[in-house]
Image: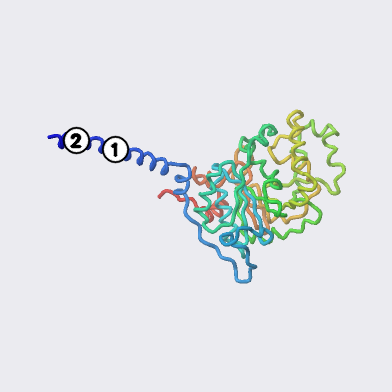
Amino acid sequence: MKRNKQRKEIYPVKIVRIMRFSCIFAVAMLIIIFSPFQSSQFSYRKASVFRSAPDCSSSTDRTKFEKIEYSKFVHVAMTLDNQYLRGSIAAVHSILRHSKCPENVFFHFLVSDTNLKTLIQYIFPELKFNVYYFDSKRVKTLISTSVREALEHPLNYARNYLAELLEPSIHRVIYLDSDIIVIDDIFKLWSTNLGEKAIGTPEYCHANFTTYFTARFLSDMRFSGVFAGRKRKPCYFNTGVMVMDLVKWRRVGYTKLIEEWMDIQKTNQIYELGSLPPFLLVFAGDVAHVDHRWNQHGLGGDNVKGSCRKPHPGPTSLLHWSGSGKPWVRFDSKKACAIDFVWASYDLYKHET
């Protein structure tokens, strides 16, 4: 009788413990399944593995060597965030597909959420890349209101700090926006002759340069006089595609010069369009030539309606959906433009069937 009584006392305790463990396990599984990474992971398919041509120079295999020889790579920098993630993944996919030597391309992702690193490793298992956390506090007090809320995101300004964020041994980098597709070998852009310039980018001198600045800027020589000493006529350029000499950038201190104009903007309202005008103020009229084929921009329409636009005539190496209309958003809303179907061939998002 005493032994039976002990059994009656022990069995309920064991059952309770098992039930508690089961509940904890179930909750843990739910957290894993519905975590941001897992939900994002299940939304994308893995990319194919792209191999370099036999005549490509060999690059350091980061799985075998602790120290990476950065001089052997083409360096590409982009931002990564949840809002533009689908675009960034498509952009990376396009670069790899069209590169003769994809294993020699090294990516540098600027993020405000480091959890995205695991997702990139899942989609591109053999991709060579680093992730750099960008603290939004660095620019929050310098950002002014813009015509489109997305242009006020701190990550839009992360390109200003590439020379500080990237390793000192990296001397040159290509910066690309997340809403682009490369349909040519990225090495051609990498080979741009910068000469003594700090950046190279396509210029558009037919555009009305003054529309990017306010009447106060144009009427005050303290501000508009900045262009007086430039060797060439200052022209509009788009900062979504730039080849950057980080050695000269660090030596001159261009980050500080850009920040100074952003600080002036806070009290004088000299421009209205996000992160672009400070770059124009520092570099317009002093950039290295890059052929227009490397930034077929404006495919996202204007900054308000984002209506469909056709590419400009001529050869094209890079398509850029600058403007408010993004191809992934258009597809999701069943309002895709004709040019968006080119982007779709690089999209790795798993569509619902």
**Label 2 belongs to which residue?**
6
Question: Which three-letter amino acid code belongs to the residue tagged 1?
Answer: Met
Return the residue nearer the eye: 96 or 103. Answer: 103
Query: Residue at the location (59% across, 66% down)?
Result: 52
Q: Residue furthest top?
A: 267
Q: Position of residue 42 (x, y in %)?
A: 44, 49
Q: Position of residue 92 (x, y in %)?
A: 58, 54
Q: CA distance from mark 1 to mark 2?
A: 20 Å
Q: Is residue 335 above or below residue 71?
A: above
Question: Which three-letter amino acid code belongs to the residue tagged 2?
Answer: Gln
Point out which mark residue 19 bears.
1
- The quarter of the image holding the N terminus is top left
Specify few, some or many for label 1: CA neighbours under 10 Å numbering under 14, 14-19, or 20 or more.
few
Q: Residue furthest front?
A: 2
The tag earlier along the polypeptide, 1 or 2, is 2
In the image: residue 223, left or right of residue 335:
right
Q: Is residue 332 above or below residue 99?
A: above
- Secondary structure beneath dot 1 equals helix
Q: Position of residue 108 (x, y in %)?
A: 62, 51
